Image (cartoon, rainbow, N blue to C red):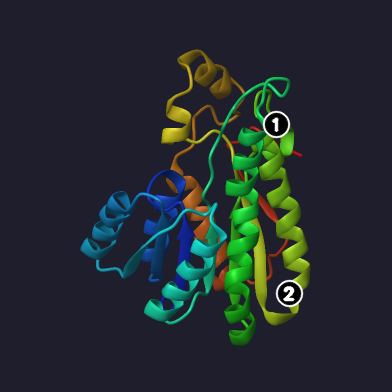
Amino acid sequence: MTLSGRVALVTGASQGIGQACALELAKSGAAVALAARNQEKLQQVAAEIAAAGGTSAVFALDVADEEQIKSTVKAAISQLGKIDILVNNAGITRDQLVMRMKRADWDTVINTNLTSAYLCTQAVIGSMLKQRWGRIINITSIFGQIGQAGQANYAASKAGLIGLTMAIAREVASRNITCNAVAPGFIQTSMTAVLSDDFKQKAVEMIPLGRVGAAEDIAHAVRFLASDEASYITGHVLNVNGGMFMG
């Protein structure tokens, strides 16, 4: 499943799922544009890629800023030559019961998790259309499929990503561009590390495979969807959740 000669842009690449995706894509031969707010962490990811013989470039990016998205995509294309693969991974949570949720927390999560994916896709789609090849992969969530108490903003943003995925897939399919989503279940990351042990235990009890997933489990799915082997898959949501959701 080689990605040699391909160039990927991964948002939220400084840690967790984004970092794992960046490392996996680089391992498969792609040059990777690493984008996130924390440039120091990005440099560490870039160093790991370089140590393994891969190619990457670091771009400080706050995906909530439209102008930063535009300038980052231009800089990545200028430095790496093109963008073949876009992984919209950047995401945050601002959990609260809906009756107490502040409008600012709603807007921040929607802008970071959903609007940024639309803006990043819009920024790269022109070059993909010209080269008649592209892979757009959105990282959604099981909670965009089943909902989650206290996460109305997060669940809405991730459900929105699924609709966005299908709409874009229909728009660009004739140009040999696919758009798919990966929906992680309970994955061990810094975002889930802060949850209580009781919550984690209850979550594991809901997973037929009986274990929490790893970021690499998501990265493997992303690598497949980015490859030529997945050329006849588009508008699809690939569930990587240990059987936690079957629908």
Instruction: Check disc 1 and report its element: helix, strand or loop.
Output: helix
> Whole-percent x and y of residue 230?
61, 67
For the point 48% across and 22% down, the residue is 195
Quadrant containing the C terminus in the rendered view: top right
Instruction: Check disc 2 and report its element: helix, strand or loop.
Output: helix
- In the image, taking residue 219 as reference, residue 235 lies left or right, namely right
Q: Nearer the viewer, residue 190 or 174?
A: 190
**Where does label 2 land, which residue?**
173
Q: CA distance from mark 2 to mark 1?
A: 32 Å
For the point 43% across and 28% down, the residue is 193
Q: Using the image, tell me which numbered label, if any, was put on residue 152.
A: 1
For the point 78% across and 68% down, the residue is 170
* Residue placed furthest toward the bottom: 130
Q: Quadrant of residue 225?
A: bottom right
Q: Nearer the viewer, residue 109 or 32?
A: 109
Amino acid type assigned to the residue bearing label 2 in the image: Ala
- In the image, taking residue 113 as reference, residue 36 lies left or right, namely left
Residue 105 visible in the picture: yes
Whichever of callouts 2 and 1 sits on the residue coming sooner in the sequence is 1
Q: Nearer the viewer, residue 157 or 50?
A: 157
Amino acid type assigned to the residue bearing label 1 in the image: Ala
Q: Residues within 10 Å of mark 1 (few under 14, many from 20)?
A: many
Residue 190 drawn above or below residue 120:
above
> Whole-percent x and y of residue 11?
48, 56
Q: Using the image, tell me which numbered label, if any, was put on residue 124.
A: none
For the point 70% across and 58% down, the residue is 165
